[in-house]
Amino acid sequence: MKARAFDYMRPKCVQEALEAFVSADGDASYIAGGQSLVPALALRLQAPGLLIDIARLDELRGLSLAGGHLRIGATTRHCEILGSNLVREHAPLLAKAAPFVAHPAIRNKGTFGGSLALADPASEFPAMALALDAIIEIASVEGSRRVGAGDFFIDLYETALQPGEIVTAVYVPLATAKTRTAFDELARRRGDYAIVGAGIDAQMQGGFVERMRIAFLSVGSTPVRVRAVEAALTGRQLTPEAIRQAQDVLGTELDPVGDEHTPPEMRRHLARVLLGRLLGRLEASR
Amino acid sequence: MNAFAGSIDRPNSYIGRSVSRPNAKRLLEGRGRYVTDLVLPRMLHAAFVRSPYAHGKIVSIDIEEAKALSGVRAVFTGEDLASICAPWTGTLEHFSNMKSPPQVPLPLGKVTWSGQPVVLIVADSRAIAEDAAELVIVDIEELPALADPVEAMSAAAMSQELADNICFATKLDSGGVEEAFDAADTTVEQSFVFGRHTAVTLEPRAIVADYDPSENRLTAHHATQTPYQFQDVYSRHYGIPEANVRVIAPDIGGSFGMKLHVYHEEMAVVGASIRLGRPIKYVADRMESFVSDIHARDHRITGRLALDRDGRITAMDVDDLTAIGAFSSYPRTSAVEGNQVIRLMGAPYDFSSYRANLSVVFQNKVQTSQYRAVGHPIACAVTECLVDAAARELGLDPFEIRERNLIPDSSYPRTSPTGYQFEKLSHQVCLARLKSIMNYDALRAEQADQRQKGILRGIGIALFVEITNPSPAFYGVGGARISAQDGAILKLTPSGEVHCSISVTEQGQGTETIIGQIVADQLGIDREKVRVMTGDTDTTPHGGATWACRGAGIGGETALQAARKLKANLLAVAGLILQAQPGELDIRADWIVEAVTGQQRVRLSEVARIAFFRSDTLPPETQAQLSVVHHYAPQGYPFAFTNGAQGCLVEVDAETGFVKILKHWVVEDCGRIINPLLVDEQVRGGVVQGLGAAFFEECLYNEEGQLTNGSLADYLVPMACEMPDIEISHVETPTRDTELGAKGCGEAGTAAASAAAMNAVNDALVGHGAVLTQIPMTPTRILRALGTI
Ligand SMILES: Cc1cc2nc3c(=O)[nH]c(=O)nc-3n(C[C@H](O)[C@H](O)[C@H](O)COP(=O)(O)OP(=O)(O)OC[C@H]3O[C@@H](n4cnc5c(N)ncnc54)[C@H](O)[C@@H]3O)c2cc1C
């Protein structure tokens, strides 16, 4: 398990990184935390000629409030999300999901932007970006653009990113007094990629659902928002009957895949159980 | 006969004491020296091209491009090494009619499992060797794979050398089984499936083979638990005199039985070093480990129990179909596990009619062989699940049915219906102790309370018998050159310390610690003054090394007898110096003392100084013997059986099929305990491996014989977060076959943990119409059993 030989560079700014990618004629890869890329290199699943290290670029760092959003710099590490008061206050769903991302050693290195750019359907943060309707800021040599999370995840490991583009930051709408959230997942062992997981971001008023977004992980080739379930619950109280109906809708909306441990019907069943449990435990930010 | 009772208060009485491991700090500080750390002058690195198919004909191999790559020193295929290496065949003579195809380092014409090494590349670095591996083109014509054990029984022979796919079959029948089942008041029958799993040592397999043609000398730095066995194997198969082969096992990061089998990679690397006359390093990476380390278990068993009206077992009948690899492993074979499964069935219980049928079949999969607790967890789970099924049928409590059926502690010695001779076991004491440390009645009350709230808790217990201290009856009688004896050399230093080199080996379990304790205890010197060395065939006597639970029982006795011999020699010299009778002297706290009064006479270091440097002051004709060599082979019972009982508490989430293991208890009797701390560590580690088998670990194969979860992301080893608190209690029934009285404990934890866990899960599911008889008990299998999915 040794990577093929590659060159390595550490650019001084995003612009230099973008240009380096162009000059490498596409035979390059950005590296951030390296927690997904390095194993792929060691297994020779990927063998780029050049690694462009973006982990230390100031432009990509930091957590801050910006225009009604929480700005999460792309190289914000998982452990920073986990430890941040700003996240806890303004994006409680992310704070709830963060402890489920891998193990401490990996959280110390892995980055938020890297997780979204990789778009592993079993990852927590891509699904939560969907549930939060986050906005993803992308830089290329042509300039900067923004894409909603709903349009970002296209297929297995495939996103709206064009070759050479860099995720620079992610903008998450701020939680309000009406915000209720819940996250949970079912994993065989603590820290494993889950068999199924889900997060809910809802606006509740007087016990009624004003708006609800629900996103699942590990149920398809991308993180999945279950819009029919959301619609079935909007305007209603979360009574046992409403929850049961939502679970039934989910059963028809999801079309999960199987793997060596888990057949598709198991995933579908667990997703239903998880949805029921999460709806029963929506809670305010703090 | 056993000289230790009550002696714990003497100075330097280390037997029975929880002392820490002298090597722990070194390893924690990162100063361990593993094979991987070794760098030799002119050393090269190996990588393998492996078969992508489980079964196939090699049409052609094109190595030209790989050979031409800069930094590549040699590329070897089948013929290159088969021409210098005698083939090996994994059979034992006492397993009659056992068969297996012969093996060579790299295949000649045919591949028989996916992951089999086909081409060896030797290069200046492992990375270059892997680059070259990508350039090799192996054209293989795929053949149908044997991937189902049941089909293997009737399918055409996979190997041209053999008539069918049955490696070994045997039957046991004590008589009276049919009659007992006809007469039974209650019978229970269950069919079990035990998944394949593998050892997953922290340190993978590793070797640096260093052949020096000028002396026809091979030095193998080898991550193995049995250096002497490999000295013999390399000598015989490569035609090098045994004395010219040196095997050094440095620090080893876990072994669990996995590192005592012959692997094609190691054999190929030795051959390549002979051909090139240069040292070559090979370290398996984790992906290679999954497709080449031995796997274990893989049994399909139907078991039946007959019971009378009082819930007494009258007969047991089992059929075991077990699947191995494409050949039987060498030199210990792949049939030992099945053999132990059928012989350990029902071992704790008092009944006489037993019948068993064993079939060991080939598969196009990785070879299987001995891994921690060989056969024990299977026999234990089948027996204990059947006993619980009978208890449910009869409305008896699990403790009650066992109390009625256990072999009484007062009735030893005994011979089991399968022919095992038990010197003395302590089932009744252990079971009673288990009940009390579990606080069983309170646990049942709490379970009932929780059930009211819809929480499904389950309590499971299991009794086990463990085989330890094997005599030559294990391998020697079958023609294998595997020693049952051990040897030790004790040397006094001129400063009065003792150096001990011994043939039992250390893989992290603390062998060196207990040997040091025994030597210091017997000599009466400070433990810090005993230096123990293991794992080098040039500097230690030939011996069995470490497997099957023998390090403490046999290695410990060897050390004890050697130390007594050295002590006698030292007292003789001291007697001359002090003009006293040696019989009136003793050694305590590094002093020669008056045995009766304890009065200090002369320091041991002073005796050493005189003996080494001023022998002129000793009486004429005196030749002080300051080093001793001693060998010990077990005699008396062929095996020292041990026993114990385990309990497990689980909570099953019936909606998701997830199980939380809340607590685990172990009562075990390994005879004389040398170091309670290390015994507890052994038991805990063993339990975790058993719970891994019960809930997590399984090598999954598809119909084409491909391992589909061969990585640490997909093969689930048990992790700390999922493991319960494990409470341990000891009962001590020393064997009278040795002075030390120690038996083994390394496999006790693994032996019964999965059985207790199965019984706990099934206890939780009582009333839900589900019984689990397959491990690992995954959420999917639990929900299927419940009919949820
Ligand atoms: C044992 C283990 C367990 C894990 N468990 C989990 C888990 O449970 N849940 C989970 O979510 N993750 C898990 N991970 C993955 C981890 O979270 C990764 O850190 C994350 O998926 C990728 O982030 P990274 O910064 O390490 O990206 P890298 O590995 O550096 O890069 C991954 C890919 O994204 C690209 N990339 C990175 N940053 C950017 C950017 N800003 N713009 C454009 N492209 C970019 C790279 O070019 C590369 O293709 C696990 C990893 C390991 C090793």
Image (spheres, rainbow, N blue to C red):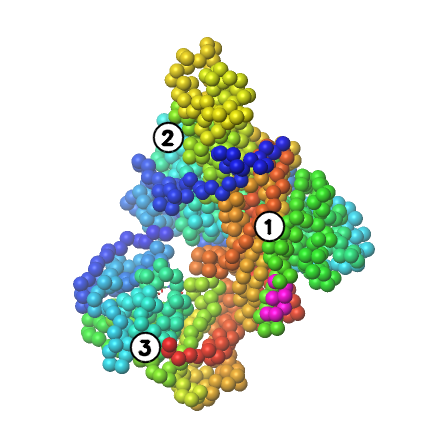
Circle on res. B667? 1
Ligand 1 lies in quarter: bottom left
- Residue B411 position in % (x across, y down): 73, 42
**What residue do we see at 33% from left, 39% from top?**
B39
Q: Secondary structure at mark 3?
A: helix
Chain designation of label 2? B
Circle on res. B212? 2
Q: Which region is colored magenta? A: B443-450
Please name which of the two marks, 1 or 3, marks the residue nearer to the observer.
Answer: 1
The answer to if B159 sits in the magenta stretch is no
The one nearer the camera, A68 or B543, is: A68
- Residue B403 position in % (x across, y down): 71, 53
Circle on res. B441? none
Q: CA distance from mark 1 to mark 3?
A: 52 Å
Q: Main secondary structure of the magenta part?
A: helix
Mark 2 vs mark 3: tell me if same chain: no
> What residue type is disc 1 on?
Val
Chain designation of label 1? B
**What residue do we see at 59% from left, 73% from top?**
B454
Q: CA distance from mark 2 to mark 3?
A: 69 Å
> In the rendered view, would you say A223 is above or below B282?
below
> What residue type is disc 3 on?
His
